[in-house]
Image: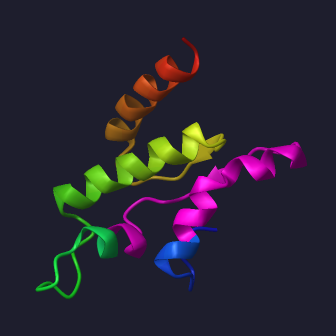
Amino acid sequence: GIGFGKRIEHNLALIRNLSRFLDLGVPILVGPSRKAFIRKLLKSKEIQDLSPDLPVVGIGTQAAVAACVLNGAHIVRVHDVEATCTTLRIIDGIKNS
């Protein structure tokens, strides 16, 4: 899973390499929504941590969702369903064109 004691690099590697799990023949679920790795990637040096509710964290979440789906995720767990549906309409269009 994403998060859960992993370093930023580990989370990014998992997302980048999700397609390696496709050979298992089961649906892949990823829950990147508002995770600390997104907030850490987006924060400035002056800020200790970003609030998960900030719009910039939502945008980062949508980028992570897009990367997850493009790399093989079948299911994504998110907080902002409406924004994610919009993101996934575009991703589905790209994948199915």
Q: Position of residue 78 (x, y in %)?
A: 45, 52
Q: Position of residue 77 (x, y in %)?
A: 52, 53
Q: Is residue 18 magenta?
A: yes
Q: Quadrant of the C terminus?
A: top right
Marker count (numbered): 0
Residue 55 lies left or right of residue 92; in this view the side is left
Q: Residue furthest top?
A: 97
Q: Quadrant of the N terminus?
A: bottom right
Residue 75 lies left or right of residue 56; in this view the side is right
Residue sitting at 58 percent across and 74 percent down?
10
Q: Is residue 13 magenta?
A: yes
Q: Position of residue 92 (x, y in %)?
A: 52, 23
Q: In terms of image quadrants, where is residue 79? A: bottom left
40 or 78, nearer to the observer: 40
Residue sitting at 36 percent across and 66 percent down?
38
Residue 61 lies left or right of residue 7; in this view the side is left
Quick check: 10 above or below 22?
below
75 or 17, nearer to the observer: 17
Residue sitting at 23 percent across and 82 percent down?
49
Residue sitting at 32 percent across and 55 percent down?
60
Q: Position of residue 55 (x, y in %)?
A: 18, 55
Colour theme = rainbow
Q: Which residues are magenta?
A: 11-38
Q: Residue furthest right?
A: 24
